[in-house]
Image (tube, rainbow, N blue to C red):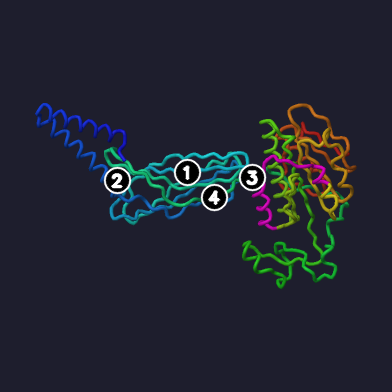
């Protein structure tokens, strides 16, 4: 199609032809015909030229968290017999969360002429300011003639999707309280004979090679072994409060993002220590226990799209209280007092260590008054104070933090 300059040339040439016919001027007629011929030749130029061919599209790195530097790399080739003209490239990008969907284009790239049978690599930065699902493609290529009178647009290549996971805090795993050996070595109720399969876990030095589960090892790209009878991993459960009734304003939205990042960070730190990790929410999501990287990224995938929803904190806690328990539990919530007093009482003594992290709002709130005895309460006043509060909490355990942070100064920690 003609560009604005091309339309101006074509209309001007037509007017010159008309004026030449009216006034009998061969000069005006010749100039007008020449201008129209240039416009037609420009259209033919872009019609017969072949654009670049998209060979592959990749994201580097493929696993990105909020704030990470992520690039989209395009591998292209010239399939024609002559070199390409100057091209303009732009990718269509769609960003989806459970709250909204937005579409925009990547920054436009100018590509110099590419010779025949040569390749070209183009890259641009993918925005990762928010967690969610990112869809990249198709690629829009604009081909213009040397005079800029006509242009032709192509859409090439398929779509590539990626998840932007929550931001991560540099924290250590939850501390194991001194003397809490209840979960250090726990016998599975499903494996009383010692020969029944309890689950799968990553291979560790000293494991019997005969217990390697080759099918799972090929799928997860790491050695996975069958687990029988007893296991020596601490169980860590993270309960994320996703009740929308507690998160209604824009400021609460930022608070919820901090809670999601805290849940992801605690799961990662616990998994790196070798724990069996589990994520549950008040919206009835339950990841189950697992210790391999595939299970961790299953949790990441849910947290990348989670949003405030309906649910009950009491219901989620009662469900956990009815189970066998054991290990550590960390509850991340915006409020558990006032509307639901005593909501953590059903936990009882099922867990050897109980920690509640309250992300307080801007308005002064009332401290929860009916927690289970022995529960550690961390008050977080703003998003950045979580790292400080958690670092102070992990420093009280018998296991030092793997990534210690600054000492908490403004965040209070209370053991009730």
CA gap, disc 3 and disc 2: 43 Å
| Overall secondary structure of the magenta section | helix
Callout 3 secondary element: helix
Q: CA distance from mark 4 to mark 2?
A: 31 Å
Alpha carbons under labels 3 and 1: distance apart: 21 Å
Instruction: For the N terminus, give its image quadrant.
Output: top left
Q: Is residue 302 magenta?
A: yes
Residue corresponding to mark 1: 92
Seen from the viewer's position, the closer of residues 69 and 187 is 187
Nearer the observer, 271 or 14 = 14
Q: Nearer the viewer, residue 189 or 356?
A: 189
Mark 4 / mark 3, whichever is N-terminal? 4
Q: Are marks 3 and 2 in contact (CB under 8 Å)?
A: no
Sequence-wise first label, 3 or 2? 2
The CA distance from mark 2 to mark 1 is 22 Å
Magenta part of the chain:
292-317
Q: Read off the residue under disc 3.
A: 305
At numbered mark 2, what does the secondary structure look like: helix, strand or loop? helix
Q: What residue does disc 4 label?
A: 161
Q: Residue 290 at x, y = what percent? A: 73, 57
The residue under label 2 is: 46
Q: Secondary structure under badge 4?
A: strand
Image quadrant in which you'd find residue 29: top left
- Seen as rendered, the residue at the extreme bottom is 210
């Amino acid at each position: 199609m003609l560009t604005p300059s091309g339309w101006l040339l074509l209309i001007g040439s037509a007017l010159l032809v008309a004026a030449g016919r009216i006034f009998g001027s061969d000069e005006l007629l010749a100039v007008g015909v020449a201008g129209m011929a240039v416009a037609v030749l420009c259209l033919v130029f872009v019609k017969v030229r072949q654009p670049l061919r998209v060979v592959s599209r990749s994201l580097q790195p493929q696993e990105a968290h909020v704030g990470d530097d992520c690039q989209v790399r395009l591998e292209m080739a010239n399939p024609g017999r002559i070199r390409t003209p100057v091209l303009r490239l732009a990718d269509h990008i769609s960003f989806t969360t459970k709250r909204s969907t937005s579409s925009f284009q990547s920054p436009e790239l100018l590509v110099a002429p590419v010779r025949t049978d040569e390749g070209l690599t183009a890259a641009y930065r993918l925005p990762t300011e928010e967690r969610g699902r990112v869809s990249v493609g198709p690629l829009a290529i604009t081909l213009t003639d040397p005079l800029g009178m006509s242009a032709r647009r192509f859409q090439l290549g398929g779509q590539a999707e990626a998840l932007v996971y929550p931001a991560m805090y540099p924290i250590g795993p939850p501390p194991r309280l001194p003397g809490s050996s209840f979960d250090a070595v726990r016998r599975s109720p499903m494996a009383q004979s010692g020969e029944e399969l309890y689950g799968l876990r990553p291979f560790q030095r000293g494991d019997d090679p005969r217990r390697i589960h080759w099918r799972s090892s090929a799928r997860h790209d790491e050695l996975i072994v069958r687990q029988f009878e007893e296991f020596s991993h601490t169980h860590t459960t993270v309960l994320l409060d996703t009740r929308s009734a507690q998160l209604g304003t824009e400021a609460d939205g930022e608070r919820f993002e901090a809670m999601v990042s805290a849940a992801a960070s605690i799961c990662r730190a616990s998994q790196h220590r070798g724990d069996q990790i589990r994520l549950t929410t008040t919206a009835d999501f339950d990841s189950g226990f697992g210790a391999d990287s595939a299970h961790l990224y299953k949790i990441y995938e849910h947290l990348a799209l989670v949003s405030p929803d309906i649910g009950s904190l009491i219901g989620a806690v009662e469900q956990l209280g009815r189970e066998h328990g054991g290990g550590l539990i960390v509850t991340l919530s915006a409020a558990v007092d006032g509307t639901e007093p005593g909501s953590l009482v059903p936990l009882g003594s099922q867990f050897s260590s109980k920690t509640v992290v309250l992300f307080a709002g801007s308005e002064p709130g009332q401290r929860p008054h009916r927690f289970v005895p022995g529960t550690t309460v961390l008050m977080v006043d703003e998003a950045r104070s979580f790292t400080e509060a958690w670092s102070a909490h992990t420093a009280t355990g018998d296991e030092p933090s793997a990534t210690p942070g600054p000492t908490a100064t403004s965040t209070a920690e209370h053991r009730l």
